[in-house]
Amino acid sequence: MLGKIKKETAERWGYMGFKSLFSSGIYFNVFAFLGLVTIAGLAVGLHGTYTGYHNVYGVTRQIPWGVLISGYIFCVVTSTGLCLVSSIGHVFGYEPYMPIAKRAVFLSIAFMLGGFIIIFFDIENPHRMAIYNLLSPNFTSNMWWMGTLYGLYLLALIVEYFFLLDQNHSMSRLAGLFGVLFGVAAHSNLGAVFGMLHGREFWYGPYMPIYFIVSAMMSGGAAIIFFSCLAWKIDRTVLTRRMERAIMAVCQLTILLIAIILFFTFWKIISGIVSPEKYIAIQAFLTGPYAPNFWIAELGFGLVIPFILLIRSKGINTNLMFIATGFMLVGIFFMRYDLVLAGQIVPVFHALHVEEYSSLLLYTPSLHEISVVTAGILIAIVLYLGGEKVLNAHKFQKHAIVPPGAFICQGCGGIHYMKEGESQDDALKRHHRMRKVDREDEHA
Amino acid sequence: MKLTNIDLEKLIPENLISVTKMERRAFLKIGLVITGVFAGGRILSVTSNVSEAFASGKDFVDQYPYKPHYSMVIRQGLCIDCERCLKACKETNSVPDYGYRTRILTKIVTDAVGRKREFIPILCNHCNDAPCTRACPTRATYKNKENGIVMMESKKCIGCKMCILACPYEARYFNAERHAIDKCNFCWDTRLSKGEKLTACSYVCPTGARIFGDMSDPDNVAYKMVHQVEKQVWVLRPESGTKPNVFYMKATRSSPWDLRKQDGAR
Amino acid sequence: MKRMALLLLASLLAASFLFGSLVAFAEDEEEHGGDIIYTKPLKAVIFSHKAHTEDIGLECDWCHEETFEMEALHMQENTDFTMDSLCNENYCGTCHNGDISFSTTTQCARCHIGVKGYNDLVRQGKLEPAEGEEIPEEQKPGH
């Protein structure tokens, strides 16, 4: 279907055809290799479906949620973050963020699909979900809302991306607004999935939904920087002045968000230490079996190292930003893993002081689980690598012929018409509904 | 040492048998006031409280809103871990080897005098405010409107395991044969609905450690067990606020209602 | 060097004492019946000869052969080897009646070690499992 896109449409969409994938030998080899790894991972996952998950997964009755849920959360957190951070530009009209929109929304969809693939292998009867989510909904269930809101969110993202491709900016903006609304609702609700389990002290409370939204934006910032820097490594021409400016702005935001998450983490620990229910779980992460996860991966890779590197990069040094956000994405994965496990490692009957539950519960991911998570995340990356080539590095189309009275927008790359006596700058602001600022006045 | 001037033989025993039912009920209407924390559970003791003394019976009714209100009383001291209940449960409800609907935990009290061992049976608490039913996205698990049993409708279960996490009593597991979460349902499908009076576990219990009954009936043995002034009754994990229907108490074979076995038990 | 040698000598001495005492302990156990584990009518009840003889100084003939046969587990075959019977001051109830020692109507899990206690003993190699009996692996939390 995509192969038969009209030439005009293809130009507008920046569609380069699948042949563009073969343009570089090394690139295609990497793409094909990752694709094969993904397929292998999915095959291992399907083997698990066939033999029964309880035989091949490391999750137990006591720890029913393992690395699959962590991987799912990682993917949807990144997706929401990408959507939220890019919306600052193309939905809420802050010009410096505009050029990242196309790639960010594309990646957002890619990560959402990756997340859904992972959760598909976690849920035992996904076919029943399709039926009974509709036929027998439980409106008090966070899980029901999660499925529903993320479904709507993905729909909004796809509509938004279609209009972004089609350069219909007012429609993409409207769809983007719904994307943001559903995204925030879905994602804070995902936090509430954990935060409303009143049998689990570690998670219970309003902290989770709030933390999820803020840390989503941090992940989104990291993902945008990481994948934009990667795009520059693939194709130098992507690095335009506007893109540089955009990444600098995202970098500044990400530094701020890391600082915020640092203090979130700090207070979570401090308040947890004085709470007898949370103390054991917190100790397991400070000094216990999960200490390397927390200190090295979560705090070191996820927060401190990128914080320093991003500040040092000044938002200009792409290599440094690339390394920093690469560390960050690894660290963020461990953050999700730790978060999922922390609420489960203390047995529910710990306070009974019985022999059976005298020690912390342990969980080790199995090969099947790791394969599925790898496949899920790789799906997003493979889609990204494909998208960079097939969709012309998400560049906005350069219009060859500019009709009289029109101009190529500096912001979106589309064609805008000027009203009589209107400058290009004013027309741009009008099209993108930005507040008119009298520059002369401002400087004076 | 001898107790002088008191003829113990002629005294009317001051236990619950000598208290009329009306007196007992009147006393209970004063309210079950929750006090203290004991052995990982909260003691529900029957103590008078001025502020509650004039309260309507509403709280009391709220506590047992179903008819019949099925409940289990675990007389902790009587459990000897013979595990007949576990075997009966597995056989009655075709529970696979990798799972269990009920379990017996061991508690070793090293600094105790005499007996140092204690066995604590656990099962689904069939909470009045069950967190699992709220968490289930498709209402595959629900509270039966009549008898308050937390049940499963297996065909609706999507297997998200949310309810396992939501349950503060670890009462649920995924049953691969049923393709659904499985849990204790007080043997509703296998026994109670077929006219049996007891669950499989309480039927085979040789010591009467598991007393199954109807809390909406003040004449029921389970009701009488729980509502004794001199007995400490507690529930597990009260801080979760789930209003569980499995009550725990200490007991020996010489306790009042000296039930070797529950009526109807094997 | 000298100090090291001394230390070595001391530890050797200590070890030999420890070993000696272990052997002596085992010999002591020979003098009485050791631990008896009853599995009928239900699993499992422990009777410790050591607790009754060494610790509180009962003589063999106080119980043998009038109340209990010398052959271990003999009374398990009797149909009246039940708690009801014990409460009527038979078997253990002869002394465990609340007067001489704690009553059989109290402290159930003091003698009843349960299936868990039985399995533990088998796993520790202190008890031979019955024929064809499978002892489940120890349930480790989380696995």
Image (spheres, rainbow, N blue to C red):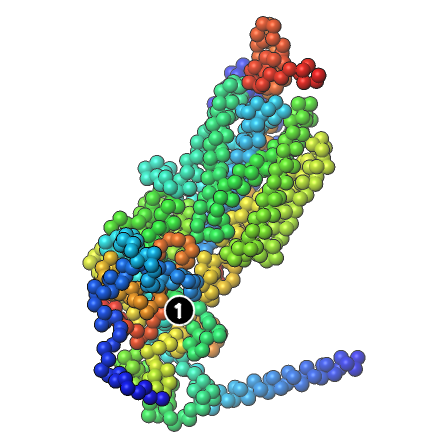
Residue A49: percent from left, percent from top: 43, 46
- Residue B109, relative to residue A267: is it above or below? below
Q: Name the residue at 53% across, 22% down.
A: A164
Residue A314: which quarter of the image? top right
Would residue B197 be found to the left or right of residue B74 on screen? Answer: left
Binning the other alpha carbons within 10 Å of mark 1 as few (below 14), some (14 to 19) or many (20 upward) gives many
Q: Which element carries disc 1, helix, strand or loop?
A: strand
Q: Nearer the viewer, residue A215 or A19?
A: A215
Q: Quadrant of the C terminus of chain A?
A: top right
- Residue A236, relative to residue B128: is it above or below? above
Instruction: Say which chain tag 1 marks.
Output: B
Residue C139: percent from left, percent from top: 46, 64
Would residue A347 be found to the left or right of residue B54 on screen? Answer: right
Q: Name the residue at 52% across, 89% down.
A: C27
Residue A262: percent from left, percent from top: 62, 44
Would residue B68 be found to the left or right of residue A246 on screen? Answer: left
Instruction: Report the residue that reaches farthest toward the right.
Output: C1
Residue B187 visible from this viewpoint = no
The kind of residue tagged 1 is Phe
Residue A372: percent from left, percent from top: 51, 44
Residue C49 visible from this viewpoint = yes
Q: Name the residue at 47% across, 87% down.
A: C55
Q: Nearer the viewer, residue B47 or A150?
A: B47
Would residue A195 be found to the left or right of residue B122 on screen? Answer: right
Residue at mark 1: B119
Q: Name the residue at 45% across, 78% down.
A: B113
- Residue A340, relative to residue A172: is it above or below? below
Residue B173: which quarter of the image? bottom left
